[in-house]
Amino acid sequence: MSEDTQKLSLKEKIGYGLGDTASNFYWQTFSIFLMYFYTDFFGLPVTSVATMFAVTRIWDALADPIMGMIADRTVTRWGKFRPYCLWFSLPLAAAGVLTFTTPDLSESGKLIYAYITYTLMMTLYTAINIPYSALMGVITPNSLERTKLSSARFVGAFCGAVFVQQFTLDLAIFFGNGDTGKGFQLVMVLYGVLAASMFLFTFISTKERVEAFKVKSDIKRDIKDFSMNGPWLIMLLLGLCVLFMFSIRSGTTIYYLKYYVGDESLTKWFLTTGGIGALAGVALTGYFTKLMGKRRLYMLMMLLGGVLTMAFYFIEPSNIRQMFALNILIAFVMGPNAPLVWAMYADTADYSEWKTGRRRLA
């Protein structure tokens, strides 16, 4: 059977999907709980934490294409992208634990420590996640099998997200035994072990069958191509805005429920039901895209998401049902955002190839 028609084994699909389960042990944890940890247990002012997140998000946006350039130029006997799941799984686990550690320092010392450890964790996360995302394109040339791999990845991501949303806070309280800050550190030890094991299984169970193009080390030309690609620059700006929005919304959820509603225990169910709403939105992305196209759909969903988010201002803290219903609706509306953004990034690669003759933005 030729590689074009070869079906991937269930083991390989599961192995690839577990890579995104592992990623979500980090992404969901620091999106939802890190700001809460910094302010309520680490002892940093909320303004300092918000500024730190804004500054480091800019680095995140720049680190992604840089990591893409590095991965494109990687040549090993295991392939271009698989080795990163092996090389950086343990360093990422260590960085996660350090990020949720509370050293005995002054406020300024703690802030410097937070900048260093959080930036390190995000950089190592990028060093795994970017090559992992590219790995799907070289596992098989068969478009149908790639679709199945993408589905496996989404299932893995959703499972990881639900686990983190449901159990993180309870685990931190349990492990902390009266010291929830210490409990978060131990939770990251657990998540680091689980994630490293899953990344290792992704490395072992997958295979790069498609020979990627050999890339010459012309980084100046790559940067020039980026700067000439207007659609990519627009997507970069939009990506930063969306990242800020999601970070603020995710990071403030626990504050909203703890200090405004007065019931911190609602957090896991609030997040989980929202995740189900997002899942439904993602599942219908293809249908909606056929009706109005990617650009119009993206604009409409962002507009609706913004209006519905502002509606939270008018909900009374006692109206839990209305609160949950609105959250599910917002999650459903914003669900298509991620697949649309990635699809439009691929379109910017097509534009770059048309304009420069080089496809360096895939």
Image: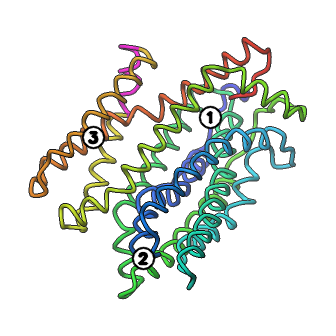
Residue 211 horizontal side relative to residue 24, left or right: right
Q: Residue at the location (63% across, 21% down)?
A: 348
Q: Magenta part of the protein: which range?
A: 282-292
Q: Does the magenta stretch include residue 355?
A: no
In the image, what residue type sits under mark 2? Phe
Indicate which disc residue 310 carries: none
> In the rendered image, which residue does mark 2 sit on?
41
Please tell me which residue lies in front, 5 or 160: 160
Decide whether the magenta segment is chiefly helix, strand or loop.
helix
Res 193 seen here: no
Q: Residue at the location (40% across, 61% down)?
A: 163
> In the rendered image, which residue does mark 1 sit on?
7
**Within-10-Å neighbours for mark 3: few <14, some 14–19, many 20+:** some
In the image, what residue type sits under mark 1? Lys
Residue 273 horizontal side relative to residue 301, left or right: left
Residue 19, position as x, y percentages in the image: 58, 52
Residue 214, position as x, y percentages in the image: 87, 32
Label 1, label 3: how many angstroms apart (C-alpha)?
Answer: 43 Å
**Within-10-Å neighbours for mark 2: few <14, some 14–19, many 20+:** some
First along the sequence among labels 2 and 3: 2
Q: In this view, does 259 lie above or below 139?
A: below
Q: Is residue 287 magenta?
A: yes
Residue 328, position as x, y percentages in the image: 25, 43
Please tell me which residue lies in front, 249 or 293: 249
First along the sequence among labels 1 and 2: 1
Q: What element carries label 3?
A: helix
Residue 336 horizontal side relative to residue 255, left or right: right
Res 299 seen here: yes
Label 2, label 3: how many angstroms apart (C-alpha)?
Answer: 28 Å
Looking at the rendered image, the quarter that the N terminus falls into is: top right
Location of residue 331 (image quadrant): top left
> In the rendered image, which residue does mark 3 sit on?
309
